[in-house]
Amino acid sequence: MWDYTSKVKELFLNPKNVGEVENPDAVGEVGSIVCGDALKLTLKIDKETGTITDAKFQTFGCASAIASSTALTEIIKGKTLDDALKVTNQDIAEYLGGLPKEKMHCSVMGREALEAAVANYRGEEKPHEAEERIVCKCFEVSEEKIRKVAIENHLTTVEEVTNFTKAGGGCGSCIPDIEAILKDIWSVKIAPEKPRIPKKLTNLQKIALIQDVLEKEIRPRLQADGGDLELIDVDGNKVSIALRAMCVACPMGGVTIKGIEEKLREIVSKDIVVVEG
Amino acid sequence: MKPIYFDNNATTAVAPEVLEEMLPYLRDLYGNPSSMHTFGGQLHKKIEEARARVAALLGAESEEIIFTSCGTESDNTAIMSAVESSPEKKHIITSRVEHPAVLNFAKHLARKGYRVTFIPVDSFGRLDMNAFMKALDDNTVVVSIMYANNETGVIFPIQEIGEILRERKILFHTDAVQAVGKIPINVKELPVDMLSLSGHKLHAPKGIGALYVRKGTRFYPYIIGGHQEHSRRAGTENIASIIALGKACELAENLKEEIVYLSRLRDKLEKSLIERCPDVRINGDTEHRLPNTTNISFEYVEGEAILLRLNEYGICASSGSACTSGSLEPSHVLRAMGVPYTAIHGSIRFSLSRYNNESEINKVIETMPSIIKALRTLSPYGRKPLKC
């Protein structure tokens, strides 16, 4: 049995904003009955101010899908379209006091319905389906969606991607594809810079330079993804670091360390070895 | 609040008589039956009494019963033993609607180089006998087909399959976890070589199962260690639970009245829900079905939502929807039957036991229409005037 918060239960049993607004200015439909959940969002929009004056939903799905739909409509009512678009799936999940991790895709569906409705209002065309690369054929999830949701939610494992997008949750044949996408997003990328040829450094200078590179180049990138690291020791060319925060449980840890090593070799010395210690 | 429990294919209440019978062996009589002292050694006799009771329910002989830890272990053991007894044969036949204990074990063997044929079922959940006949070949080492399906209650033609296999001298295992204790089974007349059962599906506790192995069938143990169960299943005996299973089997010997009682309640529930809710369908072959099970699809609504609303009234059931399966895919059984997705996601299984009564059935009949109506109001599908 799912561990739903009392807020999810409350909004599932007593949903708000159910139905369709009359003569809607915007309609967003996402999901399908085959996939097991679907959401139709209708909006009334004040054309002068661009404010959402009313929002209603119809949802086919489980308790968390229905509660997420109420959360979405409650959050966006009274907001301008631009402000509404800033609402993330995390905001929806937070409104509900959190969702079980396997159910995060319900919050993503809410956010998608909003985007679809706004695009519908603005007369923007949906990206042509034929042009999108569908990665997960069971649940028709595109590479674009996987990238977007993974970056927005700092997803680093296939399991997380499945929880948030359903991709990979069917036959599983797209799992290597998802792994490749994640690797592409999260490996510490080294910008092709002109190699700075390291001079002969004293030990003290070397340690200072290593600290400098870690502080200015590596840590900000890790922190952007919710991770961090700490310099433990420098012994000759052996640099001991400890991964912190999100990096600790991150299966890409090995890749991260490799990336750090490359960077230090480039700037400090080609003999640098980075170890986790 | 006492639950209104209609999820007996998932697990059952331990019968009071069973609990009473097993308790002394959890309190005072904790000895090891393999010991030389009377305190432990005397328990050996109790195990044999329990074995005789299990054998009696199946029409088997005592030495044909091996105690295991659960239905899954029995299934795994049976298939593995069959495979090991004829190492030159590499083909296994099973069905697409088996319990994961057989299905995933077969897939596991497929990864190890075995060829596995998964026999399809028709839209009523009945085994495709033509496909089955075609699948048989000289390389087939074992056929494992369930006696009755856990989700739909559909009963398979085990007698017919067994006769075909006996003629061809192919080993036959049946996972009878959902059948034992619900319908009469007599292995004297039933041509099966191995049969699995599970205690907690017939009012014994969880953690005890048994495997029937017909005399003369080659057997290779799956769990290897001590000499327990005549070296056919190692591990110190789960005495209290073995005794419990024996008692539960004894209680299940008189099924006639129970079958009449349960099918009457089940049929009333089914008929009333069809009358009161539109866009409803029964999944599975109602002619050949366990007396306690019904699988009903409420179209355009999602099963987890139905279950959680039922939960508010203390009503326990289960669903084949994706959201409840722990994976994102809905029931493999209903998919194999070709049930449309609109109906799979809204499928609800009610499974009864002798402890259910008519007023509980009435409670579900009263509650269900308003739940379905409320959820259909929420749903973007099936927009048409609803009577429900």
Image (cartoon, helix red, strand yellow):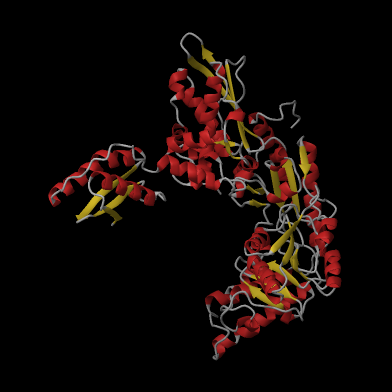
Residue B312, given in percent of the width and then of the height, sits at: 60, 43
- The mark tally for this picture is 0
Q: Is residue B201 left or right of residue A90?
A: right
Of the 4 image quadrants, the one containing the C terminus of chain A is bottom left
| Residue A100 visible in the displayed image | no
Q: Is residue B268 above or below residue B378?
A: below
Going 77% across and 53% down the picture, which residue do you hit? B120
Residue B132, given in percent of the width and then of the height, sits at: 81, 59
| Residue A73 visible in the displayed image | yes
**Frontmost residue, A54 versus B147:** B147
Q: Is residue B320 left or right of residue B286?
A: left
**Frontmost residue, B312 versus A172:** A172
Residue B271, given in percent of the width and then of the height, sits at: 81, 44
**Frontmost residue, B209 versus A200:** A200
Going 83% across and 71% down the picture, which residue do you hit? B191
Q: Is residue A175 above or below residue B212?
A: above
Most extreme residue toward the top is: A48
Residue A138, given in percent of the width and then of the height, sits at: 63, 41
Q: Quadrant of residue A227?
A: top left
**Frontmost residue, B312 versus A244:** A244
